[in-house]
Amino acid sequence: MAASYTASVTVRLKPGVLDPEAETTKRALERLDFELEELRSVDRFEIDLDADSPEAAAERADAMAQRLLANPTIHDYTVAVEPTEGPS
Amino acid sequence: MIAVCQFGGSNCDRDAVAALRDLDFEAERVWYADGLPENADGVVLPGGFSYGDYLRAGAMAARAPISKEVREAADRGTPVLGICNGAQIATESGLVPGAFTTNASARFRCEHVHLRVENEDTPWTAGFDAGDVLTLPIAHGEGRFEISETELATLEAENRVLFRYCDSEGEVTDDANPNGSVGNVAGILGEREHTAVLMPHPERATLPDLGRTDGRTILRGFAEAASG
């Protein structure tokens, strides 16, 4: 039976790919006197969808990441699925 | 007829048409939703900020139905040129390998740059000799070419790098690299030599009134390939 899920797709730069915006953000934090070693920025997409199972929801979100949300040349991504909370 | 595909947010489509017409080639703007005309002998994916650069520059336009038609046309041998945002669209749609992403400086760069011609045996560079140094304008925030080492090695082995950023003497140096592109790569070929992309703007360096005309040779080579 179909149920409501929220798939979270997290897209991040592959290790070694330069992230100039993260570098700039890190420098800005340091100017505010924060101490930090490293800062990485990621994009996270939260997708509400109905599917027959968490696996089916994850599969669809994975396809979305492959087709559009991530660019395989520069990105890795992860998919996590949870039942959608609250009234839908 | 050369079709210049206009997406919402394209802003170099008129310039591309004007530049091609100045070279006495037929060129028309084509609104993306109208699809690629059957009589398109060549395609320009113009510069601009299609879809406001949402998600990633070029990502949305690359998934518009007309981009599938452009890929199919390229498969049939129609020459395709991606300029700036058009280059980003072409990488996003798989017409050429790699990706164009945020400049290493994180700043928008709008200036003239020098480019060294790497391969003279293509329709795009037939009017040059390898090693020639051109001057073309750039205007981009996301022009840093990224590609895996393996794919870069393939591009180089197959002589598919068209242009590299260089200094006025033709030396390929870090200082001459405006955006941090791997290998100073400014333009490449797809799997076939009639598909090409570059971040600099040849159409902005074609009309004599605008000053330098190094872009003329690139567009003429393209248009001749399209009409031939």
Image: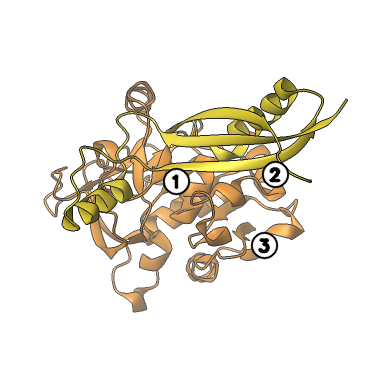
Q: Earlier in the sequence, mark 2 or mark 3?
A: 3
Question: From the image, which quarter does the N terminus of chain B lie in?
Answer: bottom right
Could one spot residue B227 in this view of the protein? no
- Dot 1 alpha-carbon crowd within 10 angstroms: few under 14, some 14 to 19, many 20 or more: many
- Alpha carbon separation for disc pair 3 and 1: 19 Å
Report the chain shown in yellow: A
Q: Position of residue B217 (x, y in %)?
A: 38, 56
Q: Residue at x 35, y 79 (%)?
A: B209
Tint applied to chain B in the drawing: orange
Q: Earlier in the sequence, mark 3 or mark 1?
A: 3
- Dot 2 alpha-carbon crowd within 10 angstroms: few under 14, some 14 to 19, many 20 or more: some
Question: Which subunit holds the residue at mark 1?
Answer: B
Label 1 sits on what residue type? Val
Mark 2 highlights which residue? B69
Mark 1 highlights which residue? B197
Q: Nearer the viewer, residue A38 or A59?
A: A38
Marks 1 and 2 belong to one chain? yes
Q: Secondary structure at mark 2?
A: helix
Could one spot residue B163 in this view of the protein? yes
Q: Examine the rendered structure and indicate whether residue A11 appears above or below residue B106.
A: above
